[in-house]
Image: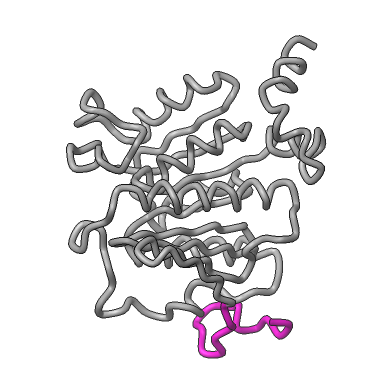
Amino acid sequence: MRQETENILKFSKQIILKKIGVVGQKKIFRSKVMIIGMGGLGCPLVQYLATSGIGNIGLVDHDRVEISNLSRQILFNKQDIGKYKVISAKKKISKISKKINISTFVKKLEKNNIKLILKDYDIICDGTDNYQTRYLINDYCLKNKKILISAAISKFSGHVFKFNFKKKIPCFRCFMPEIPSSALNCETDGVISTIGGIIGTMQANEVIKTIVGLKDDLNGNMLVYDSLKNELRKIKLTKNLDCILECKKNKDY
């Protein structure tokens, strides 16, 4: 009873929302969300998921904290340099709530381990910065009908996708059949520190909306934000009939 009262007080501002309520908050408590990549997107994403009441969070990343990360990966400080990102992140998030079940995987996500790592999670959040891994995650989620909420940032811009593969929608390969020759990358092209916070928060928002079942979501769409122009665009994705995956069989989209 004491724990229930504490939860009602802690999450009261979400609970009084008619579109969430007690029922929605209980769904949030029971949810299982995997975050792949603890970088500029993963840091704000995991913080807002934790403060929203997500009960089970998985973290995957094989990198260690470097000094160049500190300007935009807001979970970390100088004391974390040289430590594995997921281990440091778990310690920080555990201070937000000891009730969150946090699992860490100090691994590079690959074809031979993706099933073992992702199989127990309902929603997969992709915050990685390379196309090979994004294709791998897309293909696994499509095959296993997982919900994928993917984001990316570069320079002054960022975008968020949502793919609920329980429904008939196009996939990431429909939008990007092959790696573009001029693919942007934070390591080589740079990124403004604030954009990770903006896009990561958008990503977290889509997770919460998905869990509580709000209809106004991004499923099958891409949300693009340009911080230089302060422009936000929503782009509807279309099925690619030449897609190499089974989504091309989806006749309803």
Left or right of 114: which side holds 165? Answer: right
* Quarter assignment of residue 121: top right
Vertical placement of 123 versus 69: above or below? Answer: below
Vertical placement of 212 versus 228: above or below? Answer: above
Left or right of 245: which side holds 112? Answer: left
Q: Nearer the viewer, residue 45 or 31?
A: 45
Residue segment shown in magenta: 237-253
Residue located farthest toward the bottom when viewing the structure as drawn: 241
Q: Main secondary structure of the magenta part?
A: loop
Q: Position of residue 19 (x, y in %)?
A: 79, 46
Left or right of 144: which side holds 212? Answer: right
Residue 178 sits inside the magenta stretch: no
Colouring scheme, one of rainbow, by chain, secondary structure, one colour: one colour
- Image quadrant occupied by the C terminus: bottom right
* Quarter assignment of residue 38: top left
Residue located farthest toward the front when viewing the structure as drawn: 229
Which residue shows up at 60% across the image and 83% down it?
248
Q: Position of residue 166 (x, y in %)?
A: 70, 64
Which residue shows up at 27% across the image and 68% down it?
184
Q: Position of residue 86 (x, y in %)?
A: 37, 35
Which residue shows up at 80% across the image and 11% down it?
1
Q: Position of residue 246 (x, y in %)?
A: 59, 78
Q: Nearer the viewer, residue 193 or 174?
A: 193
Residue 251 sits inside the magenta stretch: yes
